[in-house]
Image (cartoon, rainbow, N blue to C red):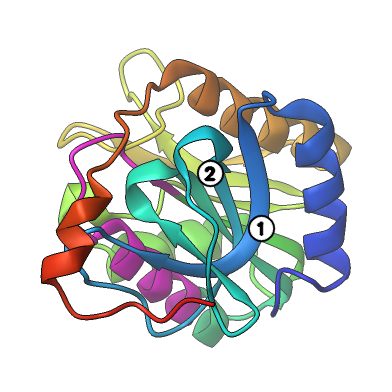
Amino acid sequence: MSGQGTLGQLLTHYFEQTIQRRYAVTSGYVYAVDGSHMERSSDLILFNRLHTPKMRSGVVPLIPVETTGAVIQTVECLTENILIDEAQHLQQVRALPTECPVTMGLIVCAASELSLTEIRDLLVEQQRDVPLTERVSAVFVLGQGLVLYDDPMTQEARYFPLESSRMTALERGEDTLSFLMLYVCSYLNSIEFIPPNFLKLLSTQHIPAE
């Protein structure tokens, strides 16, 4: 679904109230300064407003992956096919070339036909051959719980998986939205951005802009 739908509007409101002022939230296309870009727009992009030029394709914002902290796909009701489709989209975003920071990829659902355990098992299987650096970090089902990576020894949640990490399902009920905000905001607070060299775009395929 579009990030402008009911769930997207809700999350946009919450993030605008909680993330640091250096960040902004929008829907749009993610691209890299080497010219590679996504053919499909992303629902919610949390990006560093200080280092992001205002570029558009028609009326749709273009956001460089080099200034993107997180991309969130929003779903009204999660099914197996939608889970796979959204996971593949986020994996393609995360595969865009960038030195830092690492872009977090999340799926957030208003409801789900799948249990948290089924989401975990499907995502583990879907990402089995996906490089660690491109995997989806977590899935949140509001009012139910979340699926994310943790350290099996300490049970500490992770933003991104290591070889030793496991994907686990956690029931958090009505606290799931608060866990989402803490998870994303704590990551955004932990990263620093190196302003990208946009001159590289001059020697690559043109990215349409207004």
Q: Residue at x 41, y 73 (%)?
A: 89
Q: Which mark is residue 26?
A: 1
Q: In the rendered structure, does residue 87 fall within the stretch colored magenta?
A: yes
Q: Whole-percent x and y of residue 115?
A: 65, 63
Tell me which segment is drawn in magenta. 84-104
Left or right: 54, with 207 as reference point:
right
Q: Residue furthest top?
A: 154
Q: Which mark is residue 47?
A: 2
- Location of the C terminus by quadrant is bottom right
* Classed neighbour count for the residue bearing mark 2: other residues with Cα under 10 Å, few (<14), some (14–19), many (≥20): many
Q: Marks 2 and 1: in contact by CB < 8 Å? A: yes
Q: Residue at x 22, y 44 (%)?
A: 197
Q: Whole-percent x and y of residue 105?
A: 45, 52
Q: Amino acid at mark 1?
A: Thr
Q: Whole-percent x and y of residue 101?
A: 31, 34
Give the distance between the C-alpha atoms of the residues marked 1 and 2, in whole angstroms: 8 Å
Q: Count all numbered tags in the image, as a single digit.
A: 2
Does residue 95 lie above or below 112 as drawn? above
Q: Residue at x 31, y 73 (%)?
A: 37
Does residue 130 appear in the picture of this structure? no
